[in-house]
Amino acid sequence: MSLDKNDVRRVAFLARIKVDEADLEPVAQDLNNIIGWVEQLAEVDTDGVEPMTGAAGLTMARRDDVVTDGGDPEKVLSNAPDRVGDFYAVPKVVE
Amino acid sequence: MSYIIQGDTGDWEVVVGLEVHAQVTSQAKLFSGSPTAFGAGPNSQVSLVDAAMPGMLPVINGYCIEQAVKTGLGLNAQINKFSVFERKNYFYADLPQGYQISQYLHPVVGEGIVTVDLADGTTRDIGIERLHMEQDAGKSMHDQDPTRSFIDLNRSGVCLMEIVTKPDIRSPEEAGAFVRKLRSILRYLGTCDGNMEQGSMRADVNVSVRKVGEDGYRTRAEIKNVNSVRFIMQAIEIEAERQVEIHENGGEIVQETRLMDPVKGETRSMRAKEFAHDYRYFPDPDLLPLELTDDFIDGLRKTLPELPDAKKQRFMDDMGLSAKDATTLVADRESADYFEAVAEGRDAKKAANWVTNDLFGALNKAGLDITDSPISAAHLGKLLTLIDDGTISGKIAKDVFDIMWETSGDPEKIVEEKGLKQITDTGAIEAAVDEIIAASPEQADEVRQGNDKAIGWFVGQVMKATQGKANPQQVNQLLREKLKG
């Protein structure tokens, strides 16, 4: 698998990362190096080996259905760049 | 009862699949300890996890898992013992994480079946494709300020079940019946309150059309976020018409997301956002796979209540109700419980008649729910007993019912106080009968000449004379003896 300039432009847009036109080619090169490095893993024969989701053999921890949080809009809004009352205010989103 | 759109080039049928988002009934959110209650002040039910502050980690609410599995069991569906939470990536102001934690390749619930009841008394099976758990997003308000949108994250992180049907639905009626049936099952299970006005349940409606007899599916459009049964049915009608017109004019349907405008009676394209559907799902590294044991699943299976289909069958088989009455009564659990309380130890068919006709009629007229009924099940039951043991006539019972409706009173006391007890004293009834026969020689002759209908007139007169308190059978019998005997 390899990426070209257009793939990089598209992925950057989806991730809302600004990449200058001049940088697209070098970034594609970097990403291809990384992908190529990871793809070496495909050389290992994994037939009949169950996919592993973690090394520790843990199962997912569960929480009880109890309210332990909330009730503090000030804390939640303390880093908001803009607010109106207890709402976050953001530049208008036009559908 | 098939739903056909007659076009210029022939008959078309509609193919519909639904994605229903149902809010899981729980105290706390799916991955945080903040509350889920409706109607709280803005951002007052938000934890730092829901606001996606750096370093926050999700921990799953075990009860939400139980609710999802219970729902799967209620939909007669496959429960997957291994499922995975993935990140669905997109940017929007009310999605602080920049992704929604959802399930994609490995949902917790697989294929199932919902049997829907149609107006003509038939049923149809609608296939369930899957059910998965996911987080809800926050709420945006765009109309409060000229330059800014307001964001409330109270809903952010609330657990939703997305229930996806197979493209098995063939008419607006079936879609409506499916949503009502699903809502009924969820309410019986207690896994979602089904409250569409508060947004606890909403649907995305996938619609395509094809010529009758055609195999395969044509391109579909998706109508987003429809929030009532009526609008879902309306959206299908409108969208199918639109598509037939495009096909017949040689056009192409664009696979896109559309919005329903119930006021204008149209659907319109949400400006096709470029890349909008490239969500780049990947397994959430913050969460291990969800693994369920047979013990866990069987334990939940044992807690399932009797569901509407089983209840309906029992009402028909054991209590002798008609399919129509049974369907009406089991539509919600409260109605079914009410009916069973009335029918307990009494004639079930009569109980069903009183509940579905008289009580539901009055409730509908007043716009009340069964839970707000001014007449308790115990009182309605007593009224039936009063008819059965001959204390009052069926006709008087209707009057007593009206008084019970107004006063929430005990029927025994009402009958006592108003002196409505049936006259069973033959002598008193006979006197009334004689008097009326003597006063109406012409009608009496008619009966004697064989006009049986005229007897009905006499019964009416006697009932009137006794203020309805005579036993009609007894009156009838006496009249026959005297006029024809």
Image (cartoon, coloured by chain):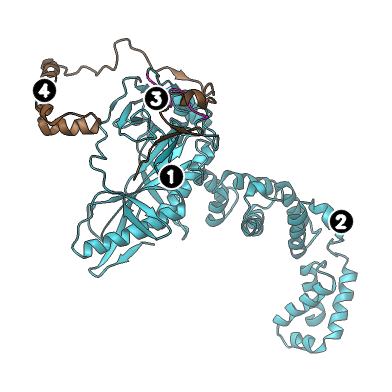
Chain colours: A brown, B cyan
- Res A85 visible: yes
Classify residue B166 as left or right of residue B37. left
Q: Residues within 10 Å of mark 1 (few under 14, many from 20)?
A: many
Mark 1–mark 3 distance (CA, rounded to whole Å): 25 Å
Q: Quadrant of the N terminus of chain B?
A: bottom left
Q: Chain of mark 4?
A: A
Mark 1–mark 4 distance (CA, rounded to whole Å): 43 Å
Q: Nearer the viewer, mark 4 or mark 3?
A: 3
Report the disc number at residue B416.
2
Q: Predominant secondary structure in magenta?
A: loop
The answer to whether dots 4 and 3 both sit on one chain is no
Q: Which residues are magenta?
A: B44-54
Q: Nearer the viewer, mark 2 or mark 1?
A: 1
Tell whether label 3 touches label 1 (CB within 8 Å). no
Q: Is residue B185 above or below residue B171?
A: above
Determine which quarter of the picture holds residue B52: top left
The answer to whether dots 1 and 3 both sit on one chain is yes
- The residue beneath circle 1 is B202
